[in-house]
Image (spheres, grey):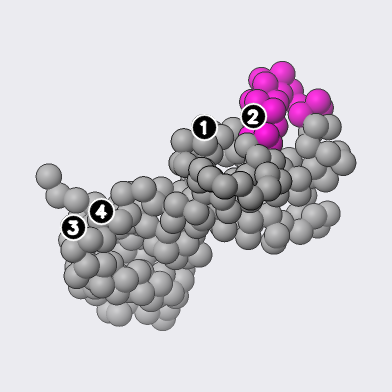
């Protein structure tokens, strides 16, 4: 069975060979549409495979591009972005340890969820810091830096109450709908003690480092919290 890296390289060849330069903004609109949609289809397949590689750097690169260009000129920009990603993948392919090293590099928060968060433009609240904390959480988790990841998880919880017109995360939990309340209540009750343990405990003669198992159970709960933030900010900006 082909690995995701090999599949990505196969699709990379299609992107590199696609004759996008044969169509320009002065060409017939139907021709532009045909080229745009054909290229976009290949690009989406490529991006989908790249996301499965679970490499922190690739995840960040993918999150910063426009995956669905509407104009032929935007397709040129997408091609340039994809070529940079292809260069990275080609370098990775030369590293025999790459796929073993990326085996545990899955993001803590799904990259598609972060893309939706990034697209929010709310006049009341600036999401810049929240987005940066989420990206750093993904990076720390993907690299196995679980102390940083645990502390960032708590930092996010402390940062977002104003989204819901609350002052504390406990108020956010209390004012949530019944099904969401149970999820956020567990997130608060269980993740905070672990964060406090690693943040406040004094140095001892013998220490134990946090493991992936200590933070992984909160992936689903935090993603639901981020999705609730997206929905709330999106609705309040309309």
Q: Which mark is residue 100?
A: 4
Seen from the viewer's position, the closer of residues 197 and 143 is: 197
The magenta region covers 173-193
- Badge 2 crowding class, 10 Å Cα cut-off, few under 14, some 14 to 19, many 20 or more, is some
Q: Quadrant of the N terminus?
A: top left
Q: Is residue 150 left or right of residue 35?
A: right
Distance between mark 1 and mark 3 Cα atoms: 31 Å
Seen from the viewer's position, the closer of residues 55 and 120 is: 55
- Identify the residue position indicated by label 2 in the image: 190
Q: Is residue 121 left or right of residue 23?
A: right
> Under tag 4, what secondary structure?
helix
Quarter residue 136 falls in: bottom right
Asked if residue 187 is among those painted magenta in the image, a careful observer would answer: yes
Q: Which mark is residue 6?
A: 3
- Identify the residue position indicated by label 1 in the image: 217
Residue 28: x, y in percent? 37, 73
Quarter residue 20 falls in: bottom left
Distance between mark 3 and mark 2 Cα atoms: 40 Å
Question: Residue shown at 30%/56% (left/top)?
Answer: 101
Residue 142: x, y in percent? 44, 53
Name which of mark 4 and mark 3 comes first in the sequence: 3
- Badge 3 crowding class, 10 Å Cα cut-off, few under 14, some 14 to 19, many 20 or more, is some
């Amino acid at each position: 069975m082909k690995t995701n890296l090999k599949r990505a390289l196969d699709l990379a060849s299609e992107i590199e060979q696609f004759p996008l330069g044969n169509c320009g903004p002065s060409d017939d609109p139907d021709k532009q549409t045909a080229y745009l949609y054909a290229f976009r289809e290949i690009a989406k397949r490529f991006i989908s495979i790249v996301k499965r590689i679970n490499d922190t750097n690739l995840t960040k690169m993918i999150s910063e591009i426009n995956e669905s260009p509407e104009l032929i000129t935007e397709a040129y920009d997408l091609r340039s972005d994809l070529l940079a990603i292809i260069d990275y993948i080609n370098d990775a392919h030369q590293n025999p340890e790459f796929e073993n090293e990326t085996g545990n590099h899955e993001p803590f928060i799904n990259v598609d969820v972060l893309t939706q968060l990034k697209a929010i433009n709310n006049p009341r609240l600036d999401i810049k810091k929240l987005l940066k904390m989420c990206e750093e959480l993904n990076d720390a988790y993907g690299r196995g830096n679980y102390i940083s990841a645990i502390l960032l998880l708590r930092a996010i919880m402390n940062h977002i109450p104003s989204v819901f017109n609350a002052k504390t995360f406990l108020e956010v939990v209390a004012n949530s709908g019944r099904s969401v309340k149970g999820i956020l209540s567990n997130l608060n009750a269980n993740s905070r003690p672990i964060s406090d343990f690693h943040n406040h405990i004094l140095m001892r003669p013998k220490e134990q480092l946090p493991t992936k198992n200590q933070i992984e159970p909160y992936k689903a709960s935090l993603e639901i919290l981020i999705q609730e933030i997206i929905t709330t900010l999106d609705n309040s900006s309309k």
